[in-house]
Image (tube, grey):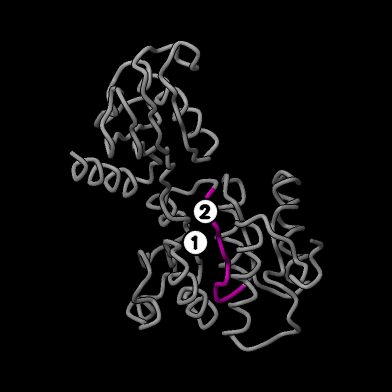
Amino acid sequence: MSKIIFEKVLEALNKDEEVALVMLTNSIGSVPGAEESMMAIYKDGKTIGTVGGGKIEFDLIKRSLKALETGESFTFKYTLNETGELKMTCGGVSEGFVRIVKPNEKLVIFGAGHVSQKIASIASSLSFDVYIVDDREEFKNVDTFKDVKKFLCCTPSEALSEINLNNRSYVILVTRGHVTDYEALKEVINRDVAYIGMMGSKKKVKEIKEKLNNEDIDKEKIKKLYAPIGLDICNGTPEEIAISIISEILVIKNKGTLKHLSEREE
């Protein structure tokens, strides 16, 4: 059964779905489920497998559905007597964990030039699912894109019909010019994503923000645009710029700060 559950969890991840994986790790005395019993719980309440049924399973399903909303895994321990939270009389103890299994974060890069190639190489090693969007066929087989999830040789609007953007998606605009950057930006600015960053000078950024304002784009959406993109490293090579961009994304993803660790208070 555990093999089937793992296969179903992987199937859900490939569909961009989150799953709660429940496992009993310790059973003492008389309990409904055996050690290493497993079940998977989906957001719609569907389940696969069992951890013994009854009150424990019912309670774990209820708690797991809440955990799927918050994204927070948890451990559990049920003491099965009349004074325990479930008021059961089995007399045993049942312990385990619920792990919220999530798909990889997506990194969607519009543009396939030098900086994009360096970003893709780094991000792929960090377990992002990387998508490259560029209408130039000649970049499709560039060696540095060998580990990306998908190279979409099409327009931004066509690409986004294939990519399911969500609040765990990060978008980078590093196309070959202002016009193509703006075209991509208009497609993503109103999406519920974790991050949108755009490369460019302050002059270019100002002009693009003015265009967005003139098109009545929500000002709060415009404020969330990270542009110019990346941390201030005083220019640099494509590799260094890529690292500064990935670093900015990691600060947001991990809810970090821009302080040096040496400055952090104990």
Counting from the top left corner in percent of width and height, residue 34 is at 26, 32
The residue identified by callout 1 is: 107
Over which residues does the magenta segment extend? 168-177
Q: Specify whether 71 is left or right of 231.
A: left
Q: Residue flagged by tag 1: what amino acid is it?
A: Leu
Q: Which residue shows up at 68% across the image and 71% down it?
A: 230
For residue 45, the mark is none
User: For residue 237, which quarter of the picture?
Assistant: bottom right
Counting from the top left corner in percent of width and height, residue 227 is at 71, 65
Q: Which residue shows up at 36% across the image and 36% down it?
A: 22
Q: Note whether residue 217 is visible.
A: yes
Q: Residue flagged by tag 2: what amino acid is it?
A: Ser
User: For residue 211, which quarter of the picture?
Assistant: bottom right
Q: Which residue shows up at 51% across the image and 76% down it?
A: 116
| Cα separation between marks 1 and 2 | 6 Å
Q: Does the magenta stretch include residue 256?
A: no
Residue found at the very far bottom of the displayed protein:
237
141 over 98 or under it: above or below: below
Q: Specify whether 264 is left or right of 256.
A: right
Q: Do the residues labelled 1 and 2 touch (CB within 8 Å)?
A: yes
Kind of element beneath mark 1: strand
User: For residue 236, which quarter of the picture?
Assistant: bottom right
Counting from the top left corner in percent of width and height, residue 106 is at 47, 57
The residue identified by callout 2 is: 169
Q: Residues within 10 Å of mark 1 (few under 14, many from 20)?
A: many
- Closer to the camera, 18 or 58? 58
